[in-house]
Amino acid sequence: MLRKLRKIYSPNFDIKKRKKKEISFIILHYTGMKNEKVALNKLTNFDSRVSCHYFITYSGEIINLVPDLY
């Protein structure tokens, strides 16, 4: 279980909810951004229209950007 999960919600997600049983996979992506701050700014910027559910920092901190059911 995660002891501490930081939440920085992004406005970039579909409002349509899904059921927990519909969640089947974990997909990892590399952002290719200059650094973590730039990546988080991009993923939480309304105009970018992109995001992810979780962001894992170089130090291993997990940041929740979009609730699982969205």
Image: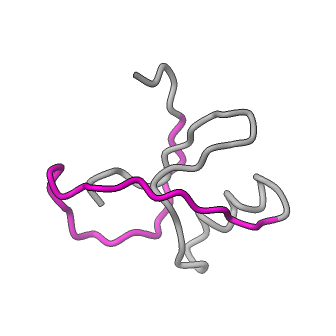
Residue at 85% x, 63% y: name it.
34
Query: Where's residue 17, x and y in %?
Result: 20, 63
Q: Dividing the picture into quarters, in which one does residue 50 lie?
A: bottom right
Q: Magenta region: which residues? A: 6-33
Which corner quadrant holds the C terminus? bottom left
Query: Where's residue 61, x and y in %?
Result: 63, 34
Q: Tell whether 4 sits left or right of 59.
A: left
Marker count (numbered): 0
In front: 61, or 49? 61
Residue at 50% x, 61% y: name it.
52
In the rendered image, residue 17 lying in the magenta stretch gets the answer yes
Q: Tell whether 4 sits left or right of 32.
A: left
Question: Looking at the picture, does residue 12 appear above or below residue 47?
Answer: above
Q: Main secondary structure of the magenta part?
A: loop
Residue at 69% x, 62% y: name it.
41
Which corner quadrant holds the N terminus? top left
In front: 58, or 47? 58
Residue at 26% x, 55% y: name it.
24
Query: Where's residue 19, x and y in %?
Result: 14, 55
